[in-house]
Image (cartoon, helix red, strand yellow):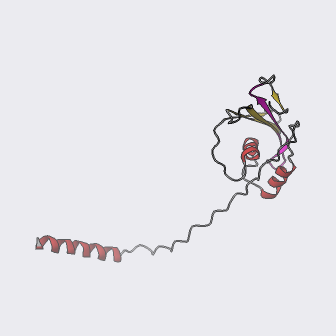
Amino acid sequence: MRRWTILLIAAVSTLAVNCASDNSPPRAARSPNPTPTATPTWAGYPQPAEGLGEISITEFNDFIQEANPPWDTSPLRSAVEFVYGGPPQEALPFTTTVTQETSPEIGTEATVTITEEGLLDDAIAAVRFQLEFQREDDGTWRLTSAFKDQRCARGPQTEEFTVEPCP
C-alpha cells in the first residue's frame, strides 16, 4: 500500500513539474465576452382603421432607414419583421403561411403574403397580410404598401377575405 502511495505522489509531482516547465508561449489573458450589440426591434405596425385594410408604412420605412437592420436586404424577412417584429411574444397557436413573388425579369419588386389560420377567435377563420416591396439602389427593400384583411368563420362571407368586421 505504501509503495502505491509513493508511486502516486511521484507521478503527481512529475506531472506538476512538466506542466510548470512548459516551453510554449504564455497565453494571453482572456478578454471578457464582448457585449452583443442588440439589433433594434420594430415596435409593430399600426392597426388599420375599421373597414379599411390599408396599414400605414411610413414608420416602418423610417425605422429601416434609421436602424439599418440586417434583414432589410430581404423582402421576405422584412415582411416577417413588419408583421411579427417587436418584443418577443409567446408562441401563438396558429398556422402561418408565407409566400413571396418576385418578378424574375426585373427583380426590383416583390409581393409577400402572410396568412394566419387556426386562430383562437371563433369569428375569424384567417387573417392575411399583403405586403409590396421595392428594391432600392443599395440592395435594400422598402415597403410600398401593406394591406390586412380577414376571412370570417361564420356568416355570409366565409369564402372571401374582407376588411369588414366578422359577425
Viewer-nearest residue: 137 or 23: 137
| 150 in magenta | yes
Please say if 30 is above or below 131. Answer: below
The N terminus, quarter of image: bottom left
* Camera-side residue of 63 and 21: 63
Q: Position of residue 88 (x, y in %)?
A: 67, 51
Position in image of residue 165 (x %, y %)? 83, 33
Magenta segment boundaries in residue numbering: 132-154
In terms of depth relative to the viewer, which is nearer, 15 or 123? Answer: 123
**Predominant SS of the magenta segment:** strand
Q: Position of residue 157 (x, y in %)?
A: 81, 24
**Is 83 displayed left or right of 10 in the figure?**
right
Q: Is residue 75 magenta?
A: no
Look at 22% across and 71% down and name the residue there: 11
Quadrant in which residue 146 is drawn = top right
Residue at coordinates 63% horizontally, 44% vertically from top-left? 91
